[in-house]
Amino acid sequence: MTLQDPANANWHMDTGASSHLNSSAHNLSTIFNSCMYPSVLVGDGKSIPVTNTGHSTLPTPYRPLHLNNVLVTPNIDFRTRQILLRCDSTGELYPVTSLSYPQAFLVGQQTWHQLLGHLGSDVPLGPSFSDLQPMLLGLVFSTIDRIIASLHAEFSMTDLGPLNYFLGVSVTRNTSGMFLSQQKYATEVLERAGMLTCNPCRTPVDTDSKLAAAGDPVSDPTLYRRLAGALQYLTFTRPDISYAVQQVCLFMHDPREPHFSALKRILRYVRGTLTSGLQLYSSTTSSLVAYSDADWAGCPTTRRSTSGYCVFLGNNLLSWSSKRQFTLSRSSAEAEYRGVANAVAETCWLRNLLRELHTPLSTATIVYCDNVSAVYLSSNPVQHQRTKHIEIDIHFVRDLVTTGHIRVLHVPSRYQYADIFTKGLPTALFDEFRDSLSVRSSPAQTAGGC
């Protein structure tokens, strides 16, 4: 994530840092009584004490940036312009070795990096990114042309040009990146249901308890199954309806009238948000962050828990899930830990995929959970009698934590984005979490309304 210089000069952002640092506890919205780490080791080898740990929130042009587990280090001076946090940068600084600038760096925000302390006075600054951009774009396009030519030599294929529409998903390129939308498909689903002119709804699901296997059978179960299946495909670009769709799909084998009413509420919400889609941003940040949550024993019929997670690669929502757990959990900590294990398994798959795409991650994946017991279980090496029934999940997550691939940290429930995948939320909180998932209105619609 590339940030402009924040209005508050006390903050100095580092997208590649393992932890964010601040020199004053007054900049934190939540302060813990204990410290995560007693001290931090900076680039020159010195150890600086940590006095507090807490959370804070910063506004950005796209969505609120929630900084979790910020370390307060009063003795650090961010304005010395020395190399404080690390000596080799792999975030927003890129060494150029293949071009004619062996000593140069590509710098996104020169002032921003100097304040951060990446560059000392003895390290020369090369040309800016705008100077080298035409050369770099030429290298990229020539590589793409060679790949297309190689594919033509092996397969019978046609180059359709830039992506704009594929399998019902419309792709619109804008100044921020790409906007993915299924507006046409959603309109067809509403026409099939006869609800194209229905009254819209603010949220796809209410805040009451989850659906139960009760009520009168629906008159047309085939229509129910077709609409529920169609909404499943719509969740490809609409993660905000994932939980609601998951709930109605649980009863496709025997739909009842309350289930059909819940399905119609989803369609009413889709009717009011037809132009919404998923925004993907252009970003050089390669940090993988996941949020995991579970609603313990929420199902009124089976008392199984619902777990959900969302995974971000930089600013972009990469993967999400809302699913009922297969087994019963005897405690909320157990349900939360099973959810963490599911999120960790997904991030492991994504890390392997990125490695196969020749973009391996150099930093640990952060998994945020709002259950303190689940966070402690991920790093506590002592086996307790009460945790033996989830021993496999414990070993799976703990081994990855030990190897440094995963870090499980606590996040306040107020900033737990995965809540939108496990339960119905009030309108204000739902709107905030939906924005955090990068679900936006169409850029054309936004521009027309200004």
Image (cartoon, grey):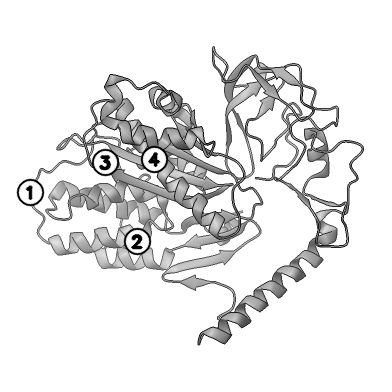
- Secondary structure type for disc 2: helix
Alpha carbons under labels 3 and 4: distance apart: 16 Å
Alpha carbons under labels 2 and 4: distance apart: 18 Å
Alpha carbons under labels 3 and 1: distance apart: 27 Å
Residue identified by numbered label 4: 420
Q: Earlier in the sequence, mark 2 or mark 4?
A: 2
Residue identified by numbered label 3: 325
Kindly indicate the quadrant of the structure image that contains residue 168: bottom left
Q: Earlier in the sequence, mark 3 or mark 1?
A: 1
Along the horizontal axis of the image, is 51 left or right of 169? right
Do tag 2 and tag 4 residues touch (Cβ < 8 Å)? no
Say which quadrant the N terminus sits in: top right
Q: Residue at x 41, y 39 (%)?
A: 418
Q: Residue at x 74, y 27 (%)?
A: 42
User: Please, is residue 129 above or below residue 88 in the view?
Assistant: below
- Secondary structure type for disc 3: loop
Q: Residues within 10 Å of mark 4 (few under 14, many from 20)?
A: many
- Amino acid found under the numbered disc labelled 4: Ile
Q: Position of residue 169 (x, y in %)?
A: 45, 67
Q: Earlier in the sequence, mark 3 or mark 4?
A: 3
Residue identified by numbered label 1: 216
Residue identified by numbered label 2: 233
Do tag 3 and tag 4 residues touch (Cβ < 8 Å)? no
Do tag 2 and tag 3 residues touch (Cβ < 8 Å)? no
Q: Residues within 10 Å of mark 3 (few under 14, many from 20)?
A: many
